[in-house]
Amino acid sequence: MYQVDLNCDLGESFGAYKIGMDEEILQFVTSANIACGFHAGDPGVMRKTVKLALMHKVAIGAHPGLPDLAGFGRRDMAISPQEAYDLVVYQIGALAGFVKAEGGRMRHVKPHGALYNMAAKRKELAEAIAEAVYKVNPELILFGLSGSELVRAGEQIGLQTAHEVFADRTYQQDGSLTPRNRPDALITDHKQAVSQVVRMVKEGTVLSQQGTDIAIKADTVCIHGDGSQALVFARQIREVLERSGICVQAR
């Protein structure tokens, strides 16, 4: 039987600004990656999102990002491995406090945006992030781009890992995500997104933008909570996965 986790980046509102449809999407996903205040989120949003996730019985993970609120953590920054380690430990600790206060348990860590993409290719950053997660709690699962340096670093240090694939993103021939500054980076047709997900889970392949199939491992599927089609994607993907004989549950 096929099995996959369905995750979404949540808790990205801050101050007077509301981003995403967290409560609605939590009805369809099995894991929540909650922003920790650097690229998005704030203490009040973190607390509310943790409570919502627990209410919906959705697994909770920390979503640490670069300290770039204006750029939503999606702009590369020249950080050292030590800085990466420090900011990941700091953000995991911040969310862990709210999770403990609400009587929950943190299950995983998934870096956000540019930090995630840099760690997918840069071994030294990947190792620093994996070490940060391991030293905070070696029982946490590290989410990383399928086949990436981040997943390899997690496995090498002794963490459980989850190879992540994306419902609403296109892929390059080397297995990387198409950069967001390109017009073909995002999939906006929910039927195309659903078809891509089912194929990744069942066949272990995805069609690259260069027209060739590439091998991919799908332990967990990401839906971006700030996308205009996020709620539609979440509902459709959950329904089609289950109709296709794929068990949707947290790892």
Image (tube, helix red, strand yellow):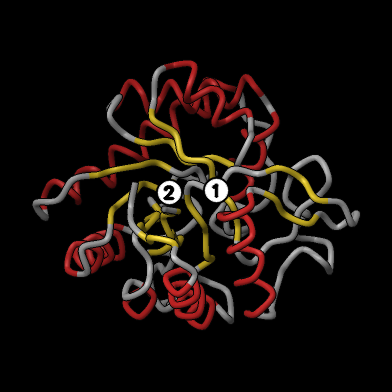
The circle drawn on residue 218 is: 1
Residue 19 visible? The answer is no
Which residue is tagged 2?
63
Q: Position of residue 229 (x, y in %)?
A: 57, 81
Q: Is residue 189 above or below residue 132?
A: below
**Looking at the picture, which amino acid does disc 1 mark?**
Ala
Q: Residue at x 44, y 62 (%)?
A: 246
**Looking at the picture, which amino acid does disc 2 mark?**
His
Q: Is residue 79 above or below residue 216?
A: above
Q: Is residue 63 above or below residue 160?
A: below
- Considering depth in this image, is 79 or 9 the residue closer to the camera? 9
Judged left or right of residue 234, residue 26 is: left
Q: Residue at x 48, y 46 (%)?
A: 219
Quadrant for residue 138, please give it.
Answer: top left
- Considering depth in this image, is 85 or 157 the residue closer to the camera? 157
N-terminal of the pair, mark 2 or mark 1, is: 2
Judged left or right of residue 93, residue 86 is: right
The residues bearing labels 2 and 1 have C-alpha atoms spaced at a distance of: 19 Å
Q: Residue at x 62, y 30 (%)?
A: 79
Judged left or right of residue 171, residue 44 is: left
Q: Residue at x 25, y 44 (%)?
A: 106
Tag count: 2
